[in-house]
Amino acid sequence: MPKELAALGHDVRIVCPAYGSVRVHSPRTARPDPLGVDVGAEAHWARTWETTLPATNIPVYLIEHDGFFARPEVYSGPHGAHGDNDLRFAFLSRAALTLCQQLGWTPDVVHGHDWTTGLVPVFLNTTLKDTPLGKTASVFTIHNLEHQGYADRRVIDFARLPHSEFRSDSLESVGAVNLMKAGLYHSTKLTTVSPTYVEEIKTPAGGWGLDDVLRFRAADLVGIVNGIDTDTWNPATDRFLPAHYSAADLRGKAACKAALQARLGLAQDPHIAVFGIVARFASQKGLDLLAEALPHIMDRMHVQFAILGSGDPGLEHAFRWAASRYPGRVGVWIGYDNELSHLIQAGSDCFVMPSRSEPCGLTQLYAMRYGTLPLVRATGGLIDTVDQFIEGTGKGTGFLFKDATAPALYNTIGWACATYYDRRAEFDRLRLNGMARDFSWRQSAAHYVDVYRWAVAQRTGQKIA
């Protein structure tokens, strides 16, 4: 999105932690002045590294603080979530705003993402209210409401925030600090990553205890579907593929299928339907439904599965078992491999996402761009991005099912197989329909600009050019 915002003429700057796992592949320089951040009993000091987003001139500021960010993991380590996450991200939120002051740069809008930035608008509304940043509008994006950043009240003292903010219409939730709730109450405008997810999170079933807050802020809440990087994810130029292809010439897709089969030890059969999965193994992603249905699928359908992911140990074991039980038909790679993820998108015929919830989802967007039909549960952003196949019409871009059950998934995979084998012209039409869709950030960025202008007008009472 920053690339597209910059292309529209906006001054965009990015702040993120210098995590121990960050690798900077472009030149970087350390700013000469240390960054003193007003948190804790005594100020914390950080070093700021400046670089640019690859292939752009967009500044990226990496906040280096060994005590908070040197560890290689982002949120969780070998023993679970880091116990100081509340302090780490309170520090980040204040550091980002302090950096603006040090740069002498007052942005029109600060755009924060998820609970880790929930205190940014709180600072703007309280301790920084009487500074130039007090006029800065805030936009807060919910990527996944399930993760809310619950914290002990100590974070209020650490952040040097007024104790009066520990109340139910600010930071407090069930006796603790809720950083997501703080962002929801204090931000000028709110967004989330699909229009359908907007409606889901305003209900008790999808609101994770914050549906009342979201109904209260409904007038300021907008759903904007995420875009994808169409340079990185492009089957005509993808450097990870053995052959390139496009909607005008799909022949290279067969070579990608053969390469995928070889990579995962699947039988070399150009005619069999291949179903791909790239996902975090978790209940949210519905992979337990696939694990339950898989033996029945393999016993009754002529298919192969290419599975990449990791997470829940039980699911890892289930998919390893499937690979050993059905050699040459189920290929599994536990972990993450970027090259293989591209190859699965290109070499599969269908891409399976049986998610229980999916705020937006990106992999179904990659699949359509690569001529691979998404087979998804009708939830969240999957509803907003995948058009249901209507037999006999040539309309649609994939296969959707409603119920989060193994039988529903089984039946939908059967429907996809029947279409692949018995109505191949329609299947191929769906490929082209998906490849014709525009899921670039161009459209989404323009929608965000509208939200930014809306936020600035509300914060300052003035329209922005």
Image (spheres, rainbow, N blue to C red):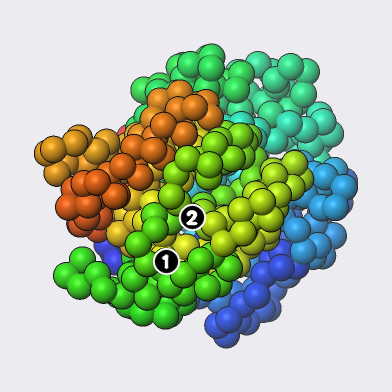
Q: Is 378 left, or right, of 203 in this rendering?
A: left
Height in image: 271 above or below 186? below
Height in image: 167 above or below 9? above
Height in image: 199 above or below 313? above
Can residue 2 be seen here? The reply is no
Q: Position of residue 194 (x, y in %)?
A: 38, 37
- Helix, strand, or loop for circle 2? strand
Quarter of the image for residue 28 reads: bottom right
Given residues 97 and 176, the one toward you in this image is 176
Q: Do the residues bearing badges 1 and 2 touch, measured as CB atoms within 8 Å?
A: yes
Point 13% across, 38% down: residue? 392
In the rendering, which numbered label is found on residue 269?
Answer: 1
Q: Which residue is mark 2?
A: 304
Q: Is 56 left, or right, of 395 in this rendering?
A: right
Given residues 251 and 273, the one toward you in this image is 273
Given residues 309 and 349, the one toward you in this image is 349
Point 61% across, 53% down: residue? 326
Point 53% across, 17% down: residue? 205
Quarter of the image for residue 9 reads: bottom left
Total marks placed? 2
Q: Position of residue 163 (x, y in %)?
A: 75, 26
Q: Amino acid at mark 2?
A: Gln
Q: Position of residue 144 (x, y in %)?
A: 55, 37
- Helix, strand, or loop for circle 1? loop
Q: Amino acid at mark 1?
A: Asp
Can residue 147 be seen here? The reply is yes
* C-alpha gap between disc 1 and disc 2: 10 Å
Given residues 200 and 51, the one toward you in this image is 200
Q: Upstream in the sequence, badge 1 or badge 2?
A: 1
